[in-house]
Amino acid sequence: MRRLMVLPLLLAGPLLLAQKPQAPAATYRPDLRQWRLEVSPALGGWSSDRTVNLRIKLVDPKDPEPPKDEGPARFFFEEEDGGDGPAQEDTRTADQLRRERQAREAEAARNAWRSRALQVWFNGATLRWQASVGTTLHTELTAQNGENRLEILEPDSGVKVVRSWWVSTARTRLRVVSLQAGDEYASGSLQVLEPDGALAEGGRRTASGGMLRWSGEYTHETPPPGTYTLKWTSGWRGGKPARIKVEALLDGGTDQERRWTWECLILPGAGPVTLGTFDVEP
C-alpha cells in the first residue's frame, strides 16, 4: 500500500515543477547619460508669430519598449457605431479582476522610471512640465515682442536645451500664467474678470481683446485700465487639496514692469475662488 501511495507523487513531481510561476521581469534601469531632449520647432532667428506650438520629447536610445507616440490631447469624444446599445455584462470572476489589477500595478511599477519633471524658464517665468520618456509633450507658448529665451532642463540626467528667437509683432502688455507651487501641479482652471465685467475663460476672447488659451495662459495686448480679478475653479485631483500659484506680468521687459504673485490652497471641487486683484493704469 505504501508503494502505491508513493508512485502518484513521483509521477506528479515533474508537473508541479513545470507549473512553477515565472519570475517577474527585471525592472529596466536607464543610463541617464545617453538621454537626449528633442524640441521642435527648432526656434531661432526672427518670427512674426507670437504663438508657438511646442513639441518636447525626452528620448532614451536604449529604451527596451518605446511607447507608441500619440498626437496631442483632444477635447471631444467621437461616437462609435453601436455606442447606444446595451452594456455587456461583466462576467469576470473576483480572481480574474485581482490578477488584472496586479498586472496593471506591475506594469505601472515597470514604467515608473519614465515619469520626469522638466524645469522650464521662459522669459523670466519659472515653470515645471510633467513629461514621460518616449512620449511627445505638446504645449503652447505665447512669445513676447522682441527677444525670447526658453530653457528646458531634465534635472536627473542634466540634459538641457536653450532656444532664443526674436518676434516682431505688437507687444503683449499683460500676461497671466499659473505656475507650479513646490512639487504640486495645478488642477483646475483660471478665470480673469476684466474691469468691464467681462469674464475670460478657456479658449474665449473677450470684447476688449483679452484671450485665455486652453493652456491656461491669459494675454492682452492693450488691457483696458481698471481692476482685474483672478479666480480659480479647482479640479478633483484625486480628492486632495491643491496649492495654486498664479503670476501676472504687466509691461514685462520694460522699465515699467510690474509683477504680482498669488498662492492659495484650494479644496478639490471648490470654486470659483478669488485669488486676488491687481490694477492696470492707463
Image: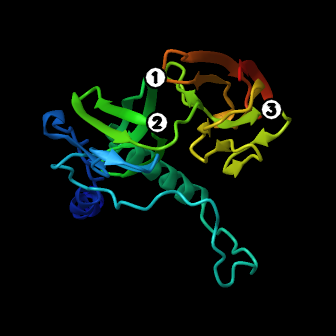
Q: Residue 272 carries which label?
A: 3
Q: Is mark 1 on a helix, strand or loop?
A: loop
Number of on-image labels:
3
Percent position (x, y) of residue 146? Answer: 40, 35
Q: Which residue lies furthest to the bottom in this view?
A: 81
Q: Residue 145 carries which label?
A: none
- Residue type highlighted by circle 2: Gln
Question: Which badge, 2 or 3, comes first in the chain's sequence?
Answer: 2
Q: Nearer the viewer, mark 2 or mark 3?
A: 2
Do labels 2 and 1 touch, CB within 8 Å?
yes
* Residue shown at the point (47%, 44%) measured from the top left: 169
Q: Name the residue under label 2.
A: 144
The Cα–Cα distance between marks 2 and 3, rounded to whole angstroms, is 29 Å
Q: Can residue 109 be seen in this view?
A: no
- Residue 245: percent from left, percent from top: 60, 22
Report, in whole angstroms, how far the alpha carbon at label 2 lies from the one at label 1. Answer: 9 Å
For the point 22% across and 27% down, the residue is: 158
Q: On the image, which quarter does residue 153 sit in?
A: top left
Horizontal side of residue 159 vs 196, given as left or right:
left
Does residue 120 sit above or below 30 in this rendering? above
Q: Please, is residue 13 above or below residue 89 in the view?
A: above
Q: What residue type is labelled 1?
A: Gly
Asked if residue 165 lies left or right of residue 157, the reply is: right
